[in-house]
Amino acid sequence: MTIDTDGFELLTVFVCVADARGFTAAAVMMGVSKSAISHAIRQLEKRAGVRLFNRTTRSVGLTEAGEVFYQRVAPLVLELKGAFTDLAQVAARPSGTLRLTLSRSAYVMFLEPLVSKFLTAFPEINLDIAIESRVVDIVNDGYDAGIRVNSFLQLDMVTVPLATDIRMAVVASPDYIKRHGVPKVPADLVHHDCIRYNSAVTGSHERWAFSSEGQHFEIETKGRISSNDGMTLLSAALDGCGYGYFYDRYVQDYLADGRLVRVLENWSPKRSLSLYYFSRSAMPQKLRVFIDFLKQYEN
C-alpha cells in the first residue's frame, strides 16, 4: 500500500468509522455523506488488499486485520491532526524571527525610528537586522526581506515602496566651509576635498549625481578619504575633512543643529527606498504583518 495526497484523508475516515462503530455516525461526525464514507473505506481496503470492517445490516466492526491496523494508525492520525492544528495556529499568528538585510543609511532613514513600535505591536516576532553595504542575495543567504535604494534592487524581486522623495545632499562642516568656501555649481566640487563612498556593488568610488531643471548628470569627485561605511563618511564630514554626499534624511539632525551645512540644494536629485523580497506562493505571516506595518509610514 502507498499513501498519496489523499492517503491521510482515507486514514482519517478509517479511524473515525472505527471510533464511531458505523458509517452513518462517522458521516455525521465528519460532515459528509454516508456514501462518501463508504467509498473512502472501499478505496482504503482496495489499496490495503484486505478487508478492514465486517459489515452487517445492524453494525460495523473491525476485522482482525482492521483491529491490528487501527492500533497502529489511530495514534498517528491523532498526532498528525495535532501537528496540522499547531501549524495552522503558527501560520495565523505572527511569530518567529524576521531576518532583514539593509544598508546603514536605509536603517537610519526609515527603519530605526520604527523598530521599537514594531516590537511592541508584535511581541512574538524577533528582528535579526544585518547592516550590509553590499547588495545581498536574500534567497541564498536566508533573509526574509531587504531594504535598499531602488537603483540597487534585483530584477526578480517583489518591491514595496517605502519612501519616494529622498533627496541627496552635499554637506560640510561650518569649519570646512569657512576655510575652503562654498561651491556655486556642482562642477566647483573638483576644487574641493570630497569624502567619497566606495561602492561594494561596483567596486569603485560612487559618482555624485545632480539634477536641475530637467538636466541630469554625474561628476567624478576627488578626495583623500573614502569608505564603504556611511558612519565613517559622516564622521569625516563632521570633523571638517571635506564635502560629503548623503541622503538628506540621513543627515537631517546634523543640518538642524548646525553641525553640517547644506550646499547646492537646488541641484539635489530624488531617490526612492523600497523593501524587497522573493516572490513565493505563501508569504510568512511575520513578513506580511511587517510589510503592512511599514506601509503605514511610507511617504
Image (cartoon, rainbow, N blue to C red):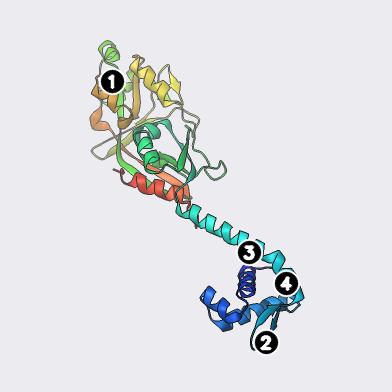
Q: Give left or right: position of 167 versus 126.
A: left
**Which residue was labeled with disc 3?**
77
The residue where tag 2 is placed is 56
In the visual, does 210 lie left or right of 136? left
Q: Residue at x 33, y 29 (%)?
A: 250
Q: Which of marks 4 and 1 is in front?
A: 4
State whether residue 229 is above or below residue 31: above
At label 1, the amino acid type is: Leu
What amino acid type should be assigned to the residue bearing mark 3?
Answer: Val
Residue placed most toward the observer, 79 or 99: 79
Location of mark 4 (residue): 67
Where is residue 259 shown, x and y percent of the image? 28, 18
* C-alpha distance separating marks 2 and 3: 26 Å
Residue 106 against residue 154 in the figure, above or below? above
Name the residue type under label 4: Glu
Give the spatial CA distance, label 4 vs label 1.
82 Å
| Mark 4 residue crowding within 10 angstroms, few (<14) / some (14–19) / many (20+) | some
Residue 175 visible (yes or no): yes
Q: In the image, which disc is placed on residue 260? A: 1
